[in-house]
Image: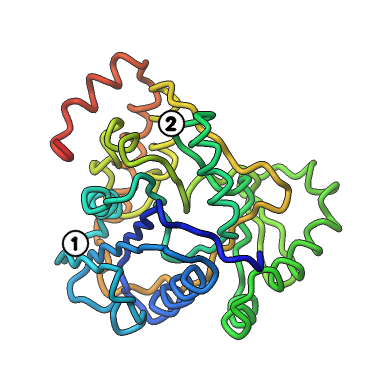
Amino acid sequence: METLIDFSDIDFVIACRIDNHERGLNAFLVYNYFRGWSKNSHFIFVEDAITPALANYVPIDESDKIIFEKNEGAFRKCRSYNIGLQYATRPFICFIDIDVILDPEQIFRVKKNIQRKEAEFGIPYNGYCFYLDQEGKDFFSKCTHLPTLKSMTYDAYKERIDKLKDVRWSGNFVKFPFFTLTGNNSMGGCIIGKKESFLDIKGFNENFKGWGYEDSEIISRIKILEKPVVKAGKKSDIMYHFPHTKNTVTVDIDNQKSYLENKREIDKIESMDKASLSEYIDSWSWLR
C-alpha cells in the first residue's frame, strides 16, 4: 500500500463522541492515517456529545466538515450516521468507526465490486478484526505505516491459522503479540455503498440507542431486502481496532436497558420477511 488511493468519489462519514482522552487519540490516528495514504478524500464527522471536543485532537482539513449535535444522553451512532448521510454529496459513502483502520486499497476494491454491479453494499474486510493492545497502538502511532504493522501482526497470525480453524469463537479469544482476535466473522466497523442505496433502505436504524447490535442489524436488513453484499476476500484483508478506555463522561444509567431494547429490535427485524420489513421501514420517521 505505497500508492495513494484516489477517493474522489467517496464521502467518509464518522460518528463520534470524544468522551475520553484515548478516543481523541484514536480519532487523530485514524484521520491522519487515511489522509496520509489516500488522495481527494473527504470526511464528514458527526460529533454527538455534550460539548465539542473533536477539534482539540484532530487537525481537520478545511475541505472536511465537523457537524456538532448537542446530546447529553446515550450516544446516538445511528442518528449521527444518518445526519452524515444527508450531508454527503459524493456518489459513494463509507461509514467507518472512529477507532478502526484498514488498508485503503480494500475499500477501493470493494467499491469497484459495487461499480461493476456485483453488489449494492460492501464490507471492506474479511471478517477478521485485530484488536490491538496498547503496545500495538503505541507502535502504530510512532510509524503510522500499516504495512509495517501488518507484517508484524499478520505473520504471527499466519503461523497459527490452521489451529484457529477449530476454535469455537463464541466467548473465546486468541491472544497474539500486539493484538487479540475474538472471532472470524465480524461485520461492524466499516461499510460502503452508494448514497442512493443507503437512502433506499432508510439508512441506519435510529431505534438503536448507545452501542449494541446496530452494525449487525443493518447487514441483516440489507440481506432480508435482498440487496447483495460483497465482502473483501483476501486473507490479508483485515481490519484493526485501536484500544480505548471504557470510562466515559456520559454514562447511560439505563445502559443495560438500552442494550436489551436493541436486542429486541434486531430480533424483530430478523424475524421479518421482505414485505413486512419494507412496510416497517416505510414507517420510520427519519430520512423522509
Residue 64, image x, y percentages: 30, 68
The answer to whether residue 72 is left or right of residue 212 is left
* Residue at image location 19% in from the left, 25% down from the top: 282
Q: Residues within 10 Å of mark 1 (few under 14, many from 20)?
A: some
**Image quarter of the C terminus:** top left
Q: Where 103 falls versus 122 (above or below)?
A: below
Q: What number of labels is visible? A: 2
Residue 179, image x, y percentages: 66, 67
Disc 1: which residue: 73
Dot 1: what SS?
loop
Observer-side mark, 1 or 2, equals 2
Question: What whole-number distance in Å separates the C-alpha atoms at marks 1 and 2?
Answer: 27 Å
Residue 261, image x, y percentages: 29, 41
Residue 268, image x, y percentages: 33, 27
Give whichever of 42, 189 is nearer the camera: 42
Way the structure is coloured:
rainbow
Q: Is residue 12 visible?
A: yes
The kind of residue tagged 2 is: Ser
The answer to whether residue 108 is left or right of residue 209 is right
Q: Where 228 falls versus 29 (above or below)?
A: above
Give whichever of 129, 203 is nearer the camera: 203
Dot 2: what SS?
helix
Q: Residues within 10 Å of mark 2 (few under 14, many from 20)?
A: some
* Residue at image location 18% in from the left, 39% down from the top: 287
Disc 2: which residue: 220
